[in-house]
Image: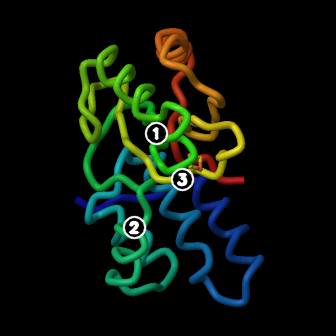
């Protein structure tokens, strides 16, 4: 099945390509847009990004599989990324992850229709550990007691990934 970007995404990618001397730096943004549009980065989505930016499939595949924010399989509408790296671990990151896991009935790496739960490495919010990232929204200084309210908020207001400035 061949995919196509929406007119809006095509416009965004074209505008980003104008900023750089080559199209290669646009690959991350194009992958974000593809993930937002198609839900995950299938082989066809990677091929689309490659042909759009005149890049080899192997290059696009390499980028898409290097970063944890890109998903190769279908997942929930909101991905909940709970950091358990050193600062967050020391301030209760694993307890927060366990609470999300219990409330959502999902092990890290699993998905439901609404949520994917991911144990994440540092998400650059160490000063407010433990931190949780959902789309572009950060939850900071999170405690297990706050987890139910965070889930309720994300049910009301899903935070899909793939926003591109
Ligand atoms: S260690 Fe968790 S945000 Fe940096």
Judged from this view, the residue extending furthest toward the bottom is 21
Name the one closer to the observer, 22 or 78: 78
Q: Nearer the viewer, mark 1 or mark 2?
A: 1
Residue for point 29% across, 37% down = 108
Instruction: Name the residue tied to disc 3.
Output: 122
- Disc 2 is placed on an element classified as helix
Residue 2 occupies which quadrant of the picture? bottom left
Badge 3 local density, few (<14 within 10 Å), some, or many (20+)?
Answer: some
* Mark-to-mark CA distance, 3 and 1: 10 Å
> Number of labelled discs?
3
Of tags 3 and 1, which is closer to the observer?
A: 3
Image height of 116 relative to 87, above or below? above
Q: Cβ(mark 1) to ligand 1 < 8 Å?
A: no
Residue 81: numbered disc:
1
Task: Report x, y in % for residue 21.
Answer: 72, 89
Mark drawn on residue 10: none
Query: In this view, which residue lies farthest toward the front?
Result: 90
How much space separates mark 1 and mark 2, taking CA atoms?
A: 17 Å
Kindly state the secondary structure of the residue where label 3 is placed. Answer: loop
**Mark-to-mark CA distance, 3 and 2:** 18 Å
The residue under the point 63% across, 40% down is: 136
């Amino acid at each position: 099945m061949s995919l196509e970007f929406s007119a809006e995404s095509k416009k965004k990618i074209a505008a980003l390509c104008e900023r750089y001397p080559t199209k290669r730096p646009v690959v991350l943004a194009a992958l974000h847009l593809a993930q937002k549009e198609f839900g995950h980065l299938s082989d066809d989505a990677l091929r689309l990004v490659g042909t759009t930016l005149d890049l080899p499939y192997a290059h696009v595949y390499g980028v898409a599989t290097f970063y944890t924010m890109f998903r190769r399989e279908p997942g929930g509408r909101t991905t909940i990324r709970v950091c358990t790296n050193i600062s967050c671990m020391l301030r209760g990151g694993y307890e927060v992850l366990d609470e999300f896991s219990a409330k959502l009935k999902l092990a890290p790496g699993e998905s439901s229709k609404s949520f994917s739960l991911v144990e994440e490495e540092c998400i650059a919010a160490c000063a407010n550990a433990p931190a949780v990232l959902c789309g572009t929204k950060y939850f900071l200084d999170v405690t297990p007691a706050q987890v139910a309210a965070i889930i309720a908020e994300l049910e009301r207001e899903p935070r899909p990934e793939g926003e591109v400035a």
